[in-house]
Amino acid sequence: MDLKQSSKFANLTLLLALIGLAAIGIIVFGAKLGLWEPIVGFGYARQTINPIGYAISALALACLIYLFTRSNRTGKGKALFALVVGLGILTPTIMTTMRAPVRLPAIHDITTNTDAPPEFVVLTDSRPGARNTLAYGGQEIASQQKQAYPDILTIQSELAPADAFTKAVDIGQDMGWEIVDEDSVAMRYEASATTPFFAFIDDVVVVVTPNEDGSYIDLRSVSRIGRGDRGMNAERIREFIAAFIS
């Protein structure tokens, strides 16, 4: 094969890598584009992302080997770039394989107060796309949460209740939550948080309670769909806590 034909192989490899990358982008962000529900995109991702990554990596490697065996440097940069794309797509799988597995409970309702979880008032089980109830699962869920996330506890603040509530609202907004109800008298608000990938929607309620030394701040985050949440609700609450106490 001559120089021109070798370049065509590299061009094809690069083109397919870019098409694969674009396809993954559509799968990951398709729900935000209104193409399908989040769970559909997540299902597509589980079925296709790794095969796409393996295919691109194998094709790029074959292209590189072919070009090197022909002592022809034309197109090697394109093939190498395609290989980087393929390995980049496979990075989450590679990292998961290298790390010790983290076993998270199959729960999707996390709160700072498992004894008296904040209740939703405005958001109900009829919220759009919801398959999970907002009724708390009781002691079984509480026990699993305490074992998996022992650090998630009520925030104790020296701020006056009104100031604590204002700060809690500001943090929710900074985190990109859509506040659907805010009651400054009862010092509680409800919001919806959308995950950056696949656009899963989780619902959050935040309640501020006065005490002798300042305020208690409790929150609860619940997924609309899915038995487990892969730790997303816990991470959201941890991020809120870190922002509040900083």
Image (cartoon, rainbow, N blue to C red):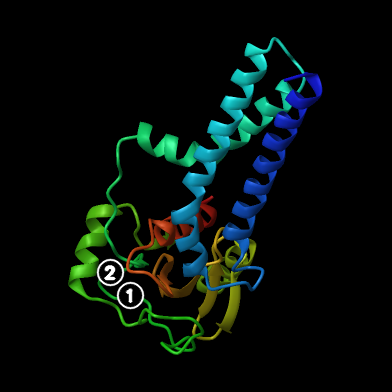
Compared to 14, does 51 lie above or below? below
SS of the residue under disc 1: loop
96 or 63: which is nearer to us? 63
In the image: residue 107, left or right of residue 74: left
Name the residue at 43% across, 35% down: 95
Instruction: Give how far across and how far down residue 130 sits, in percent.
Output: 44, 81
Three-letter amino acid code at the position of disc 1: Pro
Quarter of the image where one finds residue 138: bottom left
Q: Give the CA separation, mark 1 to mark 2.
A: 5 Å
Q: Residues within 10 Å of mark 2 (few under 14, many from 20)?
A: many
Image mark for residue 21: none
Give how far across and how far down residue 38 sits, in percent: 52, 69
182 and 209: which is toward the camera: 182
Viewer-proximal residue among 101 and 149: 101
Q: Is residue 93 visible?
A: yes
The N terminus is located in which quarter? top right
> In the image as oriented, which residue stretches furthest toward the front?
1
Q: Is residue 158 visible?
A: no
For the residues bearing labels 1 and 2, Cβ distance under 8 angstroms: yes
The residue identified by callout 1 is 117
7 left or right of 101 in image: right
Q: Report which residue position mark 2 lands on.
A: 114
x, y (%) of residue 162?
56, 74
Q: Residue at x 29, y 78 (%)?
A: 136
Going by the numbered disc 2, the residue's amino acid type is Thr
Identity of the residue drawn at 64% across and 46% down: 21
Residue at horizontal 35%, vertical 66%? 110
Residue 133: quadrant of the picture: bottom left
Other-residue count near label 1 (Cα within 10 Å), few / some / many at <14 / 14–19 / ≥20: many
